Image (cartoon, rainbow, N blue to C red):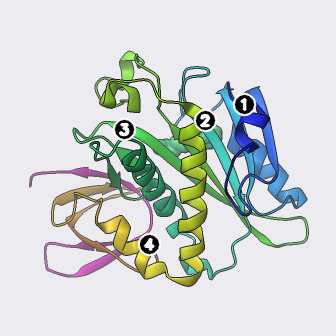
Amino acid sequence: MLTSHEITDGLKTRFIGKKLFVFETIDSTNACARLLAETGVENGTIVYAAHQTRGKGRMNRRWLSEKDVNLLFSVVFHPEFAEQKYFLVPLMISLSVVETVRILEPTIALQVKWPNDVLDSDGRKIAGILTELTRTYDDKPRIVAGTGINVNQIDFPENLGSKASSLSVVCGKEFDLRLLFHTLLERIEERYEQIIVAPELLVEAWRSHCTLFNKKVAVEQDQRTVLGIFRDIDSGGAMILEDKKGGKIRILAGDVTTVHY
Ligand code: BTN
């Protein structure tokens, strides 16, 4: 596992990771970061763990990860932008993951999947992001952005079938977790600041790594499934779906799969 020194020494960020909590095993870095956020920890506080016993995924799913070989962490943000831009946070992190891998392995092109996944070129999942909103005891908004990246894991549970992969499987080499983490945190900080000053650049960059535009998709939500053509994302990170009648629907959450109908 990475030690706190390995994480902080040489990390070239301004605010991300200046406060750091490191665990060998924890239930969920998001659950911990959420509690810390509510007590008022600094902007950019990180909770990192080598292993989670109750890793949380989106839509009440679990996030399973082998001990020590992957990256599991959550960042507490103090959003200094309007609520309409909160949905840009998972997009910003998935973009940062793709860019990090591009920096370290220029021949590997991963893709972002709306709203919060990173996939390999065969559509297998490499990373997932779970953002949660909470408030401090004195009612200030906080965003907890939890990221799980399959890095050096080679075998995956059978029930995931061929849906999961890792950087190591894709690149055929083992990754240096420390270098990957540093590069990623530096990317995240740069892209996070863009949410404040130039969100259109962030959205444009995200678009350039998305391969689902103009495809027919099904968006599964809690109570319903919406069908349509994935036309774009807007300046707030929402999906713009075109329905059968050509109408535009703005979608903020859901699980996307490509369909033929
Ligand atoms: C998803 O794809 O459903 C999101 C998965 C998010 C998993 C990460 S692992 C670190 C952080 N802590 C958690 O409990 N979940 C997130």
Mark 1 CB near ligand 1 (8 Å cut): yes
Residue in view at x 61 percent, y 20 percent:
67
Q: Secondary structure at mark 3?
A: strand
Residue tagged by mark 3? 125
Distance, label 4 to label 1, CA atoms, is: 32 Å
Residue tagged by mark 4? 202
Q: Which mark is residue 27?
A: 1
Residue 121 position by quadrant: top left
Distance, label 2 to label 4, CA atoms, is: 25 Å
What amino acid type is highlighted by mark number 1? Asp
Q: Mark 2: give few (<14), some (14-19) or many (20+) Cα within 10 Å.
A: some
Query: Which of pointers 3 and 4 indicates the residue nearer the eye?
Result: 4
Q: Position of residue 40 (x, y in %)?
A: 88, 61
What amino acid type is highlighted by mark number 2? Arg
Q: Quadrant where the N terminus lies? A: top right
Query: Which of pointers 4 and 1 indicates the residue nearer the eye?
Result: 4
